[in-house]
Image: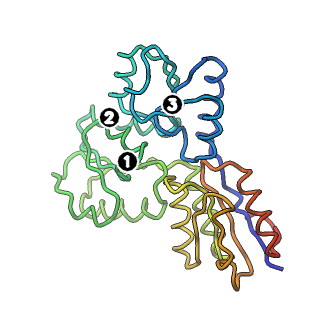
Amino acid sequence: MGEIIVAQSHGFCEGVKSAITILNMAVNEFDKVYVLHELVHNPFVINSFKDKGVVFVDSLDEVPDDSALVFSAHGVSPAFRKKAEEKNLKVIDATCSLVQLVHDKVRNYSSQGYTIIYIGKKGHAEVEGVLGEADMFVINSAEDVDKLNIDNGKLVCLTQTTLSVDDAEEIPAKLKEKFPELKFEGGICHATTNRQNAVKDLAKKCDLVLVLGAKNSSNSNKLMETAKKQGVPAYLILDKSELKEEWLNDVQTIGISSGASCPEFLLDELVNELEKFNFSVRKTL
């Protein structure tokens, strides 16, 4: 019989729990609630709120004036906040406190005349919100450092909260080589760090790692990448339906983790599915 080891640190982070609680309160208070972008990156969470009548939009132009609007956990730019005010929207802010902290730091350093280097993935909702705070240089790899052409003056580096822990070591190290006076402020949240470290330990003891999460979830993708870097096969799946039987060939121990926006019931369902293939849960790690 094969074994399943579940990562001790997995699933909903505090920011996601808070965002879900805030949206539930808004649903109870207002007849109609709009949410800018996805509240969190998981379709099961999103669909559960759609069933309650919540409307998710990609633009403030889709929100009628005087309506109730929730900002997602990923945060928004000052321009969005201003436009929401102009439309007289009743804004409920579900921005993660750690994401908000990065926004605050960007404004603070910008006001002090610092040139800001930000490590993050362009196009991600969190990153787009931060970019709205000030002009900055955005990079996503060690190779991007070589392309930077900045006078070595007052420089500070901040990061996306869901950045890979490994990238958060490699990229700043290269930045420091090029810009010795660089001040590194970071920004990766503790939940991201804990989950990635747990997957590292998990991968060392398993023949296969399965990560539950949405394809557009940055932190879930980083968990899969972290496992792969340990030299074991790893797959990111949305739920048990994406499990492929051939992955289990010659596998004795399976490690399971889940992204910060993934509901716990999906992990339970995956474990139950694996039990059909003669695997059983041994412990958490």
Can you give x and y, in whole percent of width and height, for residue 233 in the image?
A: 58, 76
Which quadrant, please, contains the C terminus?
A: bottom right
Amino acid type, residue under disc 3 in the picture: Val
- Give the residue displayed 65% in from the left and 30% down from the top: 52
Which class describes the residues within 10 Å of circle 1: few (<14), some (14-19), or many (20+)? Answer: many
Q: Earlier in the sequence, mark 2 or mark 1?
A: 2
Give the mark, 1 or 3, whose residue is nearer the N terminus: 3
Q: State the SS at label 1.
A: strand
- What is the secondary structure assignment of the residue under circle 3? strand
Instruction: Tell me the kind of residue under disc 2.
Output: Glu
Report how far apart the C-alphas of labels 1 and 3 lie in the structure. 27 Å
- Callout in the foreground (1, 3): 3
Nearer mark to the viewer, of 2 and 3: 3
Residue behind mark 1: 158
Identify the residue under disc 2.
133
Sequence-first disc among 2 and 3: 3
Q: Is residue 233 above or below residue 55?
A: below
Residue picked out by circle 3:
35
Crowd class of label 3 (few under 14; some 14 to 19; many from 20; radius 10 Å): many
Q: Residue at x 71, y 54 (%)?
A: 266
Does 233 appear above or below 60?
below
Q: Position of residue 34 (x, y in %)?
A: 51, 27
Q: Position of residue 158 (x, y in %)?
A: 37, 47
In space, the residues marked 2 and 1 are separated at their CA atoms by: 13 Å
Which residue of the protein is positioned furthest toward the bottom in this rendering?
A: 250
Tell which of 25 and 35 is nearer to you: 35
Task: Pick the residue in front: 126 or 107.
Answer: 126
Disc 2, SS: loop
